[in-house]
Image: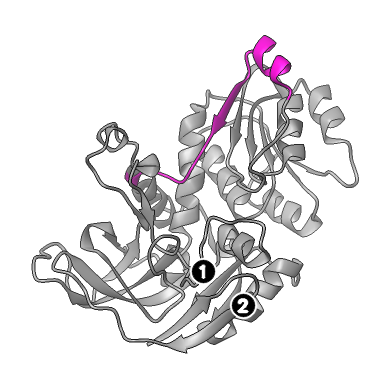
Amino acid sequence: MKVAVWYGGKDIRLEDVPTPKIRDDEVLVKVKAVSICGSDLHAYLGVSKRRIPPLVMGHEFSGEIIKVGRTVKDHKEGERVVVEPIISCGTCRLCRLGRNNICENLKLVGLHLSGAFSEYVSVPAKKCITLPKSVSFEEASLVEPLAVAVHAVHLASLEKNEAIAIIGSGAIGLMTLQVTKNKSAGKITVLDTLDYRLALATQLGATTTINVKKENPLQKILTDGGADTVFEAVGHQETVQQGLAMVKTGGKVIVIGMLEAIMQLPMLDITVKEIKLQGSYGYTSDDFQQALKLIAQGKVNVKPLITHLLPLDDIKKGFEILSQGAENVIKIVLRP
């Protein structure tokens, strides 16, 4: 089968390798659509060291089951599925608390295990969810990042009519926008540096948008009384500091972005203003299933986020488009 192997930096090579064998409790999935995650791009650009080459990346994917293991009873060949790529142990303290996204023995397809930038991938059958007919393979490849947004909004415990600020209108920010709209949020302000992304944020329901290169976001948001909750979807020290500066006393800053490992933050302000600074990592299995339902029910529209559809052979082109921020890119979906 064909795979795209990442050897570090911008070195991605198409190779032929044997089709994976499956264990008794696994299925073999023919990958139909896999999207490039920002974390994959960070590895490609060398700004994240979480991935260790050589590695087949790719964890946002859907496909068709073509083979089932001997003990698999809940799935069958020919079934259209989306795969939840977080594989947790189910027995540690955190798993028992329902927090499998931070399992003490967590493994992620495409990070710790061979991923979906390939024609086929073997996965535990229990991680497959049947796709409704109304959800395409391409849309299903965005269930995983949508689950990240669902989890972040869940952690925020939003009250009705809260003033929301979302820093960053990439795929995660735009999905967070739509999930907050479904939670009956009040005014939602989206911040970014790119006008085309902000235009899409308006189309998807943002009340106000701010291009931070053209306007002072703090002045504008604080003039309106500040934000009750801020979602930070970039991962830079500057944007986390920005979120802390614009949130109201007693408010919440949910950090989704993962770029800089160490930051200097105004701890005195966090303390005396009783600001809740909350990290948000991945999603639980419940979040993942909720994300699929939101797409299937038409409550979240992921189609406008898919700006490019490319064959797996063009994976390097896809990474270069993303690295350059070219062609008004938001999300690239590959079809192996």
Q: Position of residue 148 (x, y in %)?
A: 49, 47
Disc 2 packing (10 Å; few <14; some 14–19; many ≥20):
few
Q: Quadrant of the C terminus?
A: bottom left
Query: Which disc is residue 279 wearing?
Result: none
Residue type indicated by callout 1: Pro
Residue 336: in sight, yes or no? Answer: no
Above-or-below relation of 2 to 38: below
Disc 1 packing (10 Å; few <14; some 14–19; many ≥20):
some
Q: Quadrant of the N terminus?
A: bottom left
Residue 70 relative to residue 34: left or right: left
Give, as a single range, the part of the protein colored magenta: 266-285
What residue sits 38% from the left and 49% below the top? Answer: 288
Above-or-below relation of 261 to 161: below
Residue 25, magenta (yes or no): no
Name which quarter of the figure residue 167 lies in.
Answer: top right
Residue 162: in sight, yes or no? Answer: yes
Q: What residue sits right under mark 1 in the picture? A: 53
Residue type indicated by callout 2: Asp
Q: What residue sits right under mark 2 in the picture? A: 11
Q: Position of residue 309 (x, y in %)?
A: 57, 77
* Secondary structure category for the residue under label 2: loop
Q: Judge by depth and name the residue closer to the eye, 206 or 329.
A: 329
Above-or-below relation of 208 to 85: above
Q: CA distance from mark 2 to mark 1?
A: 10 Å
Determine whether label 2 and label 1 are within 8 Å by CB: yes
Residue 270, magenta (yes or no): yes
Q: Position of residue 151 (x, y in %)?
A: 46, 40
